[in-house]
Amino acid sequence: MFGFFATMRSGVYFSMVTLAIAELLYTLAPNLQGVFGGETGISSFRQPFALWNFGSEQHVYTLVLIWTVLSAGLLWAYTRSLFGRLTIALRENEKRLPALGYNVHATKILVFAVSGMFSGVAGALLAVSNESANYVLFQLSMSSSVVLTTFIGGSTLFLGPAIGGFLMSLFGHVVSDLTRSWLLYQGVIFIVVMLKAPNGIAQWSLDWVDAIGRDGWRAAGRLVLQVLTLAFAALGIVLLCELCATLFARDYAAEVERTGVWPAISVFNRAWLPTSPTTWLMPLALVGAAAAVHWSTRRLKVRA
């Protein structure tokens, strides 16, 4: 039903319609106690089934793994089928399909339904893992995270979105324990990927493998310089953001007001004095080094 209306448009308009539908459900779900469980959602307890004792996290992990492999296999078979090729044609050139005799709207609805089915599998597995489901699943952040991980991993490769989901999930689990600004860094990563590798990290890696196989050590040298550029820029941006985040924090401001002294800020296991010029020159120097290496990389690319 939702697909019938959403697939009447393409591109950004399609995205806006689907996001609007999710927001509509996000608004209605807390008021539909009998369907969505209201604000508390629907909760349950995992019960033993056959030889499986789902009270064990290992059994839950095995269940999720089996369904993930099965779903990935079905999706791979889907992409190799005739309708899967039609789906790719729909993505590449929608305007040419009517000339070949296909009903574009009906095709979109079917693709939308297949996508919704596998999304439902993922949602069911999440409910089994968490033993609950509530209206938070309809939040904009949930939908946007899927889009972000898809484009970061690469939407043109079969395993691209899975790679993006793995990397960003790992990034969130690791970095969220280290800093409160991890969402900011996630947004910066998305911007950098869209600017430097618009086809995603997976396709970017394959392109570099092909380049190294074709040009040898020259391409490897350019890759090393590009990695150094990203490393210097990342260090500079993280240092500057962490310094500013601590300076503007309420706890730090209260401590300054109580003691009258600007305490040192710990970043990268080192104390940085906010009143020292070196503290603010260091991130600028790192970003400048990244710019210099980037300029050298561009010269090498032009020569190649």
Image: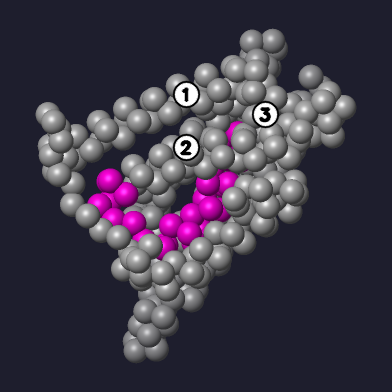
Residue 143 highlighted magenta (yes or no): yes
* Disc number placed over residue 87 in the picture, else none: 3
Dot 1, how many residues are within 10 Å of its Cα: few (below 14), some (14-19), or many (20+)?
few
Q: What's the magenta region? A: 127-154
* Disc number placed over residue 232 in the picture, else none: none
How far apart marks 3 and 1 lie (CA) works out to 15 Å
- Give the SS element for disc 1: helix
How far apart marks 1 and 2 lie (CA) works out to 10 Å
How far apart marks 2 and 3 lie (CA) works out to 16 Å
Whichever of callouts 3 and 1 sits on the residue coming sooner in the sequence is 1
Query: Mainly helix, strand or loop, the magenta region?
Result: helix
User: In x, y percent, where is residue 54?
Assistant: 16, 40
Q: How is the image coloured?
A: one colour
Identity, as a three-letter code, of the amino acid under mark 1 = Leu
* Disc number placed over residue 118 in the picture, else none: 2
269, 124: nearer the viewer: 124
Whichever of callouts 1 and 2 sits on the residue coming sooner in the sequence is 1
Instruction: Give the residue at mark 1.
Output: 74
- Give the SS element for disc 2: helix
Whichever of callouts 2 and 3 sits on the residue coming sooner in the sequence is 3
90 over 73 or under it: above or below: below
Identity, as a three-letter code, of the amino acid under mark 3 = Thr
